[in-house]
Image (cartoon, rainbow, N blue to C red):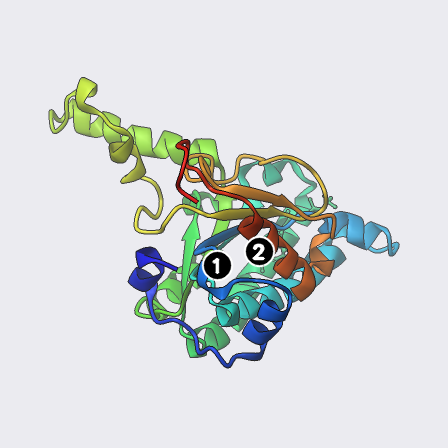
Amino acid sequence: MGDRAGMLGLLPPTDNPIRERAERHGIDLDRLPVHVAIIMDGNGRWAQMRGKPRLFGHRQGYKNLRGVLLDAADLGIKVLTVYAFSAENWRRPNDEVAGLFKLIERAARDELRVLHQNNVRVLSSGRLDEVPAGLREALAIGAETTKDNTRMVFNLAINYGGRAEIVDAVRKIAADVREGAIEPEAVTEQDIARRLYHPDLPDPDLMIRTGGDLRVSNFLLWQSAYCELHISKSLWPEFKEEAMFDAVLDYQDRTRKFGGLTRG
Ligand code: FPP
């Protein structure tokens, strides 16, 4: 899995049942993506197909996320970033927005114990100063409690936009330029990368979008420059182990070149 995985913690035991099932599915456990990012789309459609309100779908989406997260940790994924609330989601009806924030806050509080027990470090990415104070507090408690955990990083993108993240980094650079700490012509890609929300995390290797749409939707724009995309037709509440294995297999079937000719 290389140095990047080593940096982030211990490898999981090889006798884990999900790892055996993954191998039977054809997955090479030595070539897992280190960082997986997920656009969890399709909750609304899933609910509407059942004649239920959209929030019912989001609640089911939360339940599914719980399973996927623990599966990913057991499989040996080192970083999982999920798109929980995009900067564009404010355009939804007020009750859906409020319901989503409540659900995410409840999840952050209720799941903290199990995440901590599983040695998972919780982070968040996004403009958190604009989200309800209770949610901000729950995320801060989660980050503080789990800051020394090493098995997997779980990064929640909340009020997140890829362009906004780049704007926030550029503002920091502009301030440094104003103070004379850096010359405009000396600004490099690394200067921007270092000012993103979590510069310590490796870029995603695999981005999964559920629900079938072929869009990136402003998710991790800077970090996804070379990541592999996998579109799953499953709606998020139905994205289970086999669909996850298919995504990893798809990733492993591709040769990653990073713009060059040989690196695979
Ligand atoms: C997109 O489905 C999903 C979201 C906007 C929210 C994702 C939230 C969850 C999975 C639940 C809770 C999350 C956490 C972190 C506890 P959509 O509503 O756009 O679906 P549609 O495309 O079918 O309308």
Return the disc, 2 or 1, that comes first in the chain's sequence.
1
Q: Quadrant of residue 245?
A: bottom right
| Picture residue at 13% right of the left edge, 26% below the top | 179
Residue 189 at what x, y percent from top left?
29, 30
Q: Which residue is mark 2?
A: 248
- Badges 2 and 1: C-beta atoms under 8 Å apart? yes
Question: In the orientation shown, which residue stands out farthest toward the left?
Answer: 180
| Picture residue at 86% right of the left edge, 52% below the top | 49
Amino acid bearing label 2 = Val
Question: In the orientation shown, which residue stands out farthest toward the front?
Answer: 262
Rendered-image quadrant of the C terminus: top left
**Closer to the camera, 171 or 233?**
233
- Going by the image, does 84 lie left or right of 194? right
Question: How many numbered discs?
Answer: 2
Does residue 240 appear in this view?
Answer: no
| Picture residue at 54% right of the left edge, 70% below the top | 70
Amino acid bearing label 1 = Leu
Q: Which residue is mark 1?
A: 32
Q: Under tag 2, what secondary structure? A: helix
Distance in Å between CA atoms under marks 2 and 1: 7 Å
Q: Under tag 1, what secondary structure? A: loop
Rendered-image quadrant of the N terminus: bottom left
